[in-house]
Image: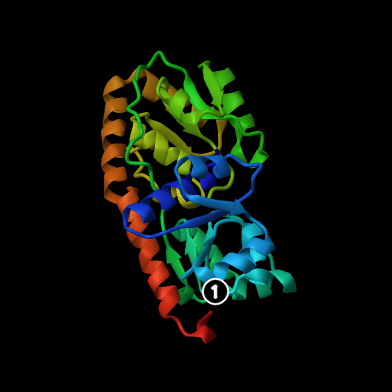
Amino acid sequence: MRGGQRQVLILLQALREAGHDCTLLAAKSGQLFPAALQSEFAVHTADAAHIWRLSPKADLVHVHDARAHTLAAISCRRKFVVSRRVAFPVRRSLASLWKYQRPARFLAVSRFVAQELAAAGLRHEKIDVVYDAVSDHVPDADWSPTHPVIALASRDREKGRDLVERASAMGPFPVRFSDTLESDLRHGSVFLYITRSEGLGSAVLLAMAMGVPVIASCVGGLTEVFEDEISGLFVHNDPPEITKAVQRVRNDPALAQMLIDGAKRRIAESFTTRHLREATLRSYRRALSSDSNDS
């Protein structure tokens, strides 16, 4: 399950715990659909017909990706809000500009993403920053400097796998490119998150919560996740610099423990399900209280 899908499930569970009934529309081909069913949520196929039929039964509709945003703009019969997770600029076509004027509010995953929305001409007062969260029940990692470095298995060029591979060869140090992140992080020495573009980085939050030292690119919303040299290490997208940072952590258990402790404090301060729930509900209330002309 990708980070955005995992965040939807975490939000559903947090809202239910606060006493709110939620219905999910999702693609049947994805992993979110069966995961939500297993958690006993009402789930339907995400298409225009279901949005048209079910939206009048809701107080508010919350969409989480570009396709859902388009479907809601066309078919939703209630006010809706949009989560924006990606760091790249909003398209400037007439169709895109029309679509982005439809929501009552935007929930930006970071201040960086909020700035990109504002740069596209959206009013600041319609944008809320709502950070991702980590589940309250993630396992603790069994940290050891002898464990491999963990990195994402993505082949998306923006995610920087080529830079990780070059740094690994220079070290040398072993890397496990993971598509089962929570399982693999339990036996990792470092979580290496190298990317050319990032809205926030929910995978980084997971590693921090589990107790795996994080080394990440100093780009986009990642700069809001942790403090350099306190709860993680930032690097430029330069293989020699990446290699040096990995060697520092793997060769210095005291540094690794300091980063682990700092990261767990940082999660507790800003990235729990309570933070996510409260920030989301504040945005929902603002959307519901706004005049129709504001949406």
Q: Position of residue 234 (x, y in %)?
A: 43, 39
Residue drawn where x is 33% and y is 30% of the image: 211
Q: Nearer the viewer, residue 48 or 129?
A: 48
Q: Is residue 284 above or below residue 202?
A: below
Residue 97 picture quarter: bottom right
Q: Nearer the viewer, residue 119 or 229?
A: 119
Mark 1 lies on residue: 78
What amino acid is at disc 1? Answer: Arg
Residue at the farthest right position: 94
Q: Position of residue 68 (x, y in %)?
A: 62, 59
- Please tell me whether mark 1 sits on a helix, a strand or a loop: loop
Residue drawn where x is 34% and y is 29% of the image: 139
Q: Is residue 144 left or right of residue 23?
A: left
Q: Is residue 99 above or below residue 178?
A: below
Residue 190 picture quarter: top left
Q: Nearer the viewer, residue 198 or 167?
A: 198
Dot 1, how many residues are within 10 Å of its Cα: few (below 14), some (14-19), or many (20+)? many
Q: Is residue 72 left or right of residue 146?
A: right
Q: Does residue 132 appear anywhere in the picture?
A: no
